[in-house]
Every structure is written in C-alpha cells, then in structure tokens.
Image (tube, rainbow, N blue to C red):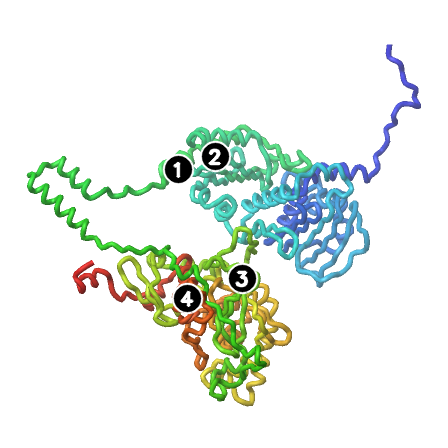
Amino acid sequence: MLEQQAPDSLPRIQRLDETVVNRIAAGEVIQRPFNAVKELLENSIDAGSTLVQIIARDGGNKLLQIIDNGCGIRFDDMPIVCERFTTSKLAAFTDLRSLNTHGFRGEALASISHVAHVSIVSKTAEAECAYRGEYFEGKLKAPVKYVPGNQGTTITAEDLFFNVPIRRRTLKSATEEFKKIVEVVSLYSLHYPRVGMSVRKAGSDGLTALKTPADSTVAANIRLMVGAEAADALIHVNHEDKRLEFSLDAYVTGPSFAGRKTQLVLFINHRLVESARLRRAMESAFTEALPRGAQPFAYVSLQIAPHNVDVNVHPTKHEVFFLHQDAIADAIQSRIVAALAAGRQSMTFLVQSVLPSNKQEQQQQQQKQSPVPRAAASQQLSQSASSSQSVIRSRVEPGVTNIEAFFGPAQKRPKLGADSGEAPDEDNNADGEPRQSANSTAANSASIVIDEGADCVRQSPTQTSVQLVGSSHSAAIAAPSPGQHRRVMRLQCVFRMQRSVEAQADAELCAQFRKLVFVGCIDRRLALAQCDCDLLLLNMQLLSEKYFYQVMCRDFGNFEVLALSEPAPVRRLLTALLSSPAYRTLAGPDCSTAGAEQLIERFLTVLQSRSMMLLDYFSMEIDSDGNVLSLPLLLKKFQPDLDYLGVYLLRLATKVDWNTESACFETFCRETAKFYALKAPFPGAAAPEPGAEDDAAPHSTQASQASTARRDPIERSVELALFPSMRAQFKPDTDCRNSRAMGKLVSLQDMYRVFERC
C-alpha cells in the first residue's frame, strides 16, 4: 500500500524566472557557433544584402562578426531588436501560410544575446549616420549611440556560451567549429549566388577560407566549392508540377563524376533543410541511374506553395513538413532518373592515345600479312638499319653540373692600407682625377659581396658592399625550403599578374628551355647554349628581365632580405645621377640645374611615403633619413649590378604608377626586374681586376680558381645560379620568339658536313 506524502513535502509548481526560460530557449536555437552564423546570415539575406562577410575567432567561441550591406535596422527599433518574439516578418499567425522569408519568430538575436555579449551597428539608407547598441539578455546595456558607419548592419557576438560552461565544454575544437561555419556559408552561397559571401579568421593575417563573388551563378559556385571535375559533369534538371504545386531546380553530377562521398544539398522555399524522405528518393535515383559505387553531388532547390509547407517544426528550422510528401518525392526521383539516363548518352571519358610501335616491328608485321621476296625483305631491313645508325646523338645533359660550382671564388683580403693607416681617396681614381661615373661618385654603388665564408667580390674602393642576411646559399634556385613559412597573398591584382604570366607562356619554347645546356657567356648580355644538336645565341638581357618579372609575381610578399652593410643615401645617388645629361631625361622635362634639388626631394618623398608597403611586400627598406637599407633577394647566389642602384631608384620614383594598386604592383615588379636583369657595365664603372685574387688561392686548386677569378663575377653567377634557375622555372612567352631572343647559330649536322666526321 502506497504511502501518501504530506502536502507540505510535495514539490510546488512555480513559474520559471524569465532569464531561465530565455536561456533554455537560447540553448535550443543556438547549439553551436555555426547555428548563430546560420541565423544571422539568413537575416542578412532577408535584408536584401548583396555582400556578407563573416569573421570568426577561436572557431566562433571568442568572436563572431557578420557584416552586410542590407537595408539596415531603423533607429527606433534598436531598443527592442534583441527581445524575444520581435520581428518585422510576421504580424499574424495566418502570415505563416504565405511566408517568403527565413526568420519569423524573432528568436535569433534574442537567443544569441542570452549566451553572448552582443553589439549591433546599423544604418539605413535614410539615416545620416550609423548607430550602435550593446545588448545582454535581450536588453540594451546603455542608450544607443551615434557612430560612423556604412549602410547595412554589423552584428558582433563575443564570448559565446560564457554563461553556459557545460555547453562550452561540449563544443569541438576551434578548427572543427570553424570548418562547420565555412561549410554552412558555402551551402548558402550555392543557393544565393547573387550574394557575395566570405569567411575569414579574425586578425590582420586572418586566413580567408571562403570567398564567392556577387552576381555569380550556381554552376560557378559549385565549381568553386566542389571542384572543376564536379562542375564539368553537372546536369541541370528543371521540373514544374502545377497539380502538386511545386517546382524543381536541381544540379546533379552525371556518370562521369566520382566523388568521395554522396553530397545532397537541399533547399525548400529557400531554407537549408533536411528531409529523410527526399534523401531516400534521391539515393534511389542515383542507385538506379548511376554505376555501382558512384558518389554523386546534388544541389536541389524546391519551391512548394507556402500554404502547403509548415515551417514551424523545429527551433533551428532545419526541418519542415509539407503536403503531398510522397508524391513530390516520387516525381523528383523520376525526373532525376530521366536526366541521368539522358546524360549517359553523352558521357566523357579520358583516354590515352596509342603510342606508335617500333618501326621494324611494323615492317615485320606487314611482311607476315603480305609475303614479299626474301631479297626485297633483306633490302628493307638493311635500309632501316642504316637509317637508325645515321641518327645524330647529342651527348650532353641539361642536369650535368659544372665542377666549378663546387669551388667558391678565390678569396683575397682587400688591400686598403690597414697596416699603414693609408686609405684610398674615395673621390679620385688612380690617376688623381675625379671619377666620371655619376653613380660611383654618389658613393656607394657597387656589386654585392655575398658572405659565404669571407667570399668577396671586389670592384672598386668606393663601392658599398652588400651581404645576404638570414639566408642559405646551398641552392641556386630560389625556391622556399620545406620548413619556411610562406605568406599566402590573396590580392586579386597579384592573381591577375600571375595568371597573365601563365597565359602568355609559349609551351614549345618552355620545353626547349628545359633542355638547354649552358656553353658560355659572350658578354654580360649574350650567352651561348646548346639544345639537342643546335647551338643557340641567347639574349640574356631580355630573357633575364622577363624571368625576374616572373619571380617578382611568383614570390610577391615572400622575398628574403638583401641587406646593405652600409646605408645607400638616396639623395647623393640621385644628385650624382641627375648631373649626367644621359639620365636627366628620366626626371622629366622640368629637370634643370636650379630645380634638381626640388625634384630629388619630391622623388625621395614619393619613396619614403611608400616605405611601409615596400618593406612589407618587397623587403625593400628605406629609413627616415632617406637611406636604402635593404633590397629584395630574387635569386640566391646571384648579384645584381649595384652600379645601377641610382638608376633603379630614379625609375621607381618616375616610372612606377603609385596611384592605383594593380598598376603600382605591376610597374614596380617590372622596374625591379629591369634592375636585376643582365646589362652592360655602367658607364664609367670600374672593371673587375683580372687575376686580382690569384695570390690567395690554395695551392691544391690554384689553377682552376685562378681562371675563375679572372672572370667577370656576374658572368660566373650567370652560369652557376641564374641559368640553372631559369632552365628550371622560366616560362618564355611569344615575345621571346618574335624578338629572336633565342636564335639558332649552327647545328651539329652542319658541322659534320663541314668537318666530314663526327
């Protein structure tokens, strides 16, 4: 017999506190960060936005920010915008029958404000300025303030679930939560291609994980999200049924696509939903029409009469009920099967062409099929044998390395009178006369000294030495090491420059360049190389300029630093340069003796005002005193001719278009490529001293290193650094063919006819 409890011990039914109710409701609507992103993204789309940006920190736990350019929120609505059951999309329950928007309950912002700190900045087209409000638990924390801002709304939610520690502990890692946010936004970008959407991590160097352009198409966004293989296999399915009051607009992959898993994206009346019945219908269609084991992709958009759909099923609205569910599912299945069956008739397969067989085997096969006299057969075989022996063979390989590459240049300590206390006069040459080189008198322009165990290249006493900082010289090709961090540049103008290089590449010349074998330098501008049996004359000035421009485009924002051991004063370089009539025309028609100082100050101001950008993107540092401290390193073990440093600075100030971003980057890269390109020695510059370094060569390698020392250091670096790098990475364009940058001098066949032997 059950004992009855005393009336006082029974639990009493009481009304829950409003804060508890709101937090419980918030936990149903906002379960993870991506749920908040989904709700706010739908609000932005309902507001007519054409551009939506999502920024997240720590997977959305620390920060979620959604920025749109929609119609905005009225100033008078700001006090109640985060309260529950406040909405502009629904006035009466009967409005649910004709609802065409995503939200209708007015719970999204309210739920977020109960589990996070929310701030809203908004501006309508009619408002003179924007206004900002901070919210907690659905209420304003302080009066709305006027702030500057653009039309649209920016919603920021910080410290999500800070007051629900259990929920916060159940969340996955920040990486997983961020991936889920990207996934949700990418699905909405398929259905709303007219809206540009982007997702990135917070911070100045935040990774942009997703970006779709505005006014795109479903097929274009599928190509972006799923891949080109899926986009090329898409089949568009359209169907309308007036009896069942629905229409179908779908994109499914045909039999030629093989994905990793089946992907079904379903929108019903513009809502991203799940439907077990429709999924089964789609899977049945795929099983019936596609090969066994196929893993297709399908995007399905259903438009069902609003009065046949019940959207008020789940707090997150990820599920809906609709009338005639089975009939609609069967109709969709039949249409998908018919479309896939039609697509089978136009399947595309990638095939490999049959390689031709050996010529002698073909002849033997023909002899078996059509017998010929034995004498004729032997004559044919002898002819084929003699023809195979007459092939010209080239016994050189592009990958063979010259033994000189394993020996550094001979080292000699500079004789600058250190013991006697005497120093050379920097303003006079050996004859006691002033130097005529404009750049040389400006101090300090010279060739590079690359510090490889006191490895020194000496040109003139007035030169400024340059050494490489923080870089290894073990490889000639300037490719990033496996452990080196490399910035990802997402500037559209840089992408266009890189794509232009790829589009203009000549495939035939590229293949020919990969087979080149270096023969030698004629001078700084011309070189000889062998390709198969041909000897080619290369215009290295033109080719190296094009190559260094490609390096500038490829390594944009990731250059190593070439630091000057002594600062190079820009004023002195430009002053000496403008004193020469040959270079005065670069400064423009206004350049005169009286106005030279004003021009130099203007040029210096142009360079110094862009110093932060130059240092960030190009590792070129110009200090506040107007000194060049470093340059970008384009190729390891290669030394540009710094006698042209003044010309380079002058051309940067006058030839670079500093007004627009795309033109600025392109012209800067081209001027830097001109500076690094091979060219004739600067007029009046001191030539390298032949054999000046022979005395310091070790006895074991004195002969080889003495011959090396007598060579121009730039020509030596062409053979050991520049040419191997160009052979591996350079992409010649059609201009190289038209300008005859690679001209044929003679072939081995012609030489054999001259010498009558091989």
**Label 1: which residue?**
343
Question: Is 694 or 743 nearer to us in this picture?
Answer: 694
**Label 3: which residue?**
559
405 left or right of 176?
left
- Mark 4–mark 1 Cα distance, whole angstroms, equals 75 Å
Q: Residue at x 70, y 51 (%)?
A: 155
> Residue 565: x percent and y percent?
58, 71
Which is nearer the N-term, disc 3 or disc 2?
Answer: 2
Which is nearer the N-term, disc 1 or disc 3?
Answer: 1
> Residue 7: x percent and y percent?
92, 21
Residue 702 is labelled as: 4
617 left or right of 23?
left
In the displayed structure, 138 sits above or below 279; it is below
Q: Quadrant of the N terminus?
A: top right
The type of residue carrying mark 1 is Gly
The type of residue carrying mark 3 is Phe
**Label 2: which residue?**
295
The type of residue carrying mark 4 is Gln
Secondary element at tag 3: loop
Secondary element at tag 1: helix
- Mark 1–mark 2 Cα distance, whole angstroms, equals 16 Å
Which is nearer the N-term, disc 1 or disc 2?
Answer: 2
Q: Are marks 1 and 2 in contact (CB under 8 Å)?
A: no
Which is nearer the N-term, disc 4 or disc 3?
Answer: 3
In the displayed structure, 164 sits above or below 330; it is below
